[in-house]
Amino acid sequence: MQFKKSISILTISIIVLSLTACLFGLLSTRGTGTYDYTAISHEVVKINGTGIYQNDSISVTAQGKASDLVTLVMGLPLLLISLFFANKGSFKAKLLLTGTLGYFLYTYMSYTFLWHYNVLFIVYVALMSMSLYAFILSMMSFDRVQFTSHFKKTLPVKILGGFQIFIAVTLSMLWLSKLAPSIFTGAVPVGLEHYTTLTIQGMDLGIVVPAAFLSGILLIRRKPFGYLLSSVILMKSITMLTAISAMMVNQALNHVQMSLAEILVFSTFNVMAIVCLILLVKNTNEQPNIR
């Protein structure tokens, strides 16, 4: 694998730092407990008050702890296993590694820009940076000439590409409908709480939506980069959507009100992503086909 040493060093560093961040997030308990805080928007927000997320709201803390748990029991093992087999030359493992690095990039980018400042801030920044460059190197490590020959002609490109376009359109409608009242009436967006901006919505609308739409179109047209980008997005979707599902469950356990539309959309996405991943794996060969 090209850039094998650099990717390995970065990935192992990510594993060590992410393990530290997850354990702190799940096990730290220092603090005085929940209290009410009046935000600049005059919204009364329930603050967590304990642990590493003591200055974050109950809602965001529930999301953070769910994300830490999924990263710990799913993300880190996937990263370690995919790195091991990718270094042995497995094409499918390289796809899994790249997609999982995309999950870590998204996760720790959100931690860096969304969470209230805490002692792990520099760890989040390091994880975001290492995930970004490991992801770039992993994308560059594929042989673009032979890449498409790893996929069978039976690969249902319209289904997989259509799913990605569906994600892009639905996610856009979901978040824009959330933003519309604040755009046209100046009202405070639902879910802003005591934070300064809607970080996740910004990341999704600015990065995820365009990437999903572009990869879907390119895959349907059977363009080489469409195969690569679609593979990465589908691999990443499994881990990211599983984390989001866990976040929603944990929010419900903490009596946080959630939008029914968001629950239905992300739960449906999760199931569909698993189906699409199965279709992708079934139609992928370890060795390139001679055409």
Image (cartoon, rainbow, N blue to C red):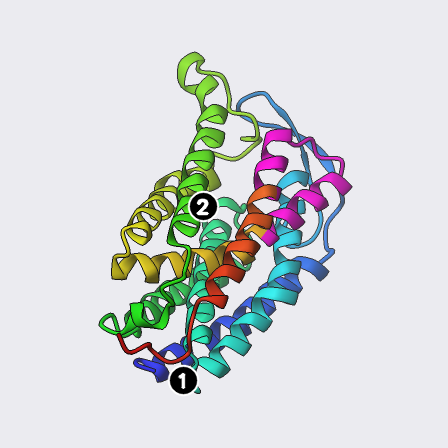
For the stretch drawn in magenta, the main secondary structure is: helix
Q: Is residue 257 magenta?
A: yes
Relative to 182, is 119 on the left or the right?
right
Q: Which residue is mark 1?
A: 89
Which amino acid is tagged 2?
Answer: Phe
Q: Residue at x 54, y 61 (%)?
A: 278
Mark 1 residue type: Gly
Q: Which residue is mark 2?
A: 163
Residue with the most extreme bottom position:
88
Question: x and y percent of residue 208 in the render?
Answer: 40, 46
Image: magenta residue range:
242-267
Residue 67 or residue 244, whichever sits in front: 244
Can residue 49 be seen by looking at this rendering? no
Q: Vertically, is 271 above or below 192? A: below
For label 1, the SS is: loop
Q: Quadrant of residue 59?
A: top right
What residue is rendered at 56% in x and 26% in y?
Answer: 190
| Residue 200 seen anywhere in this rendered image of the structure | yes
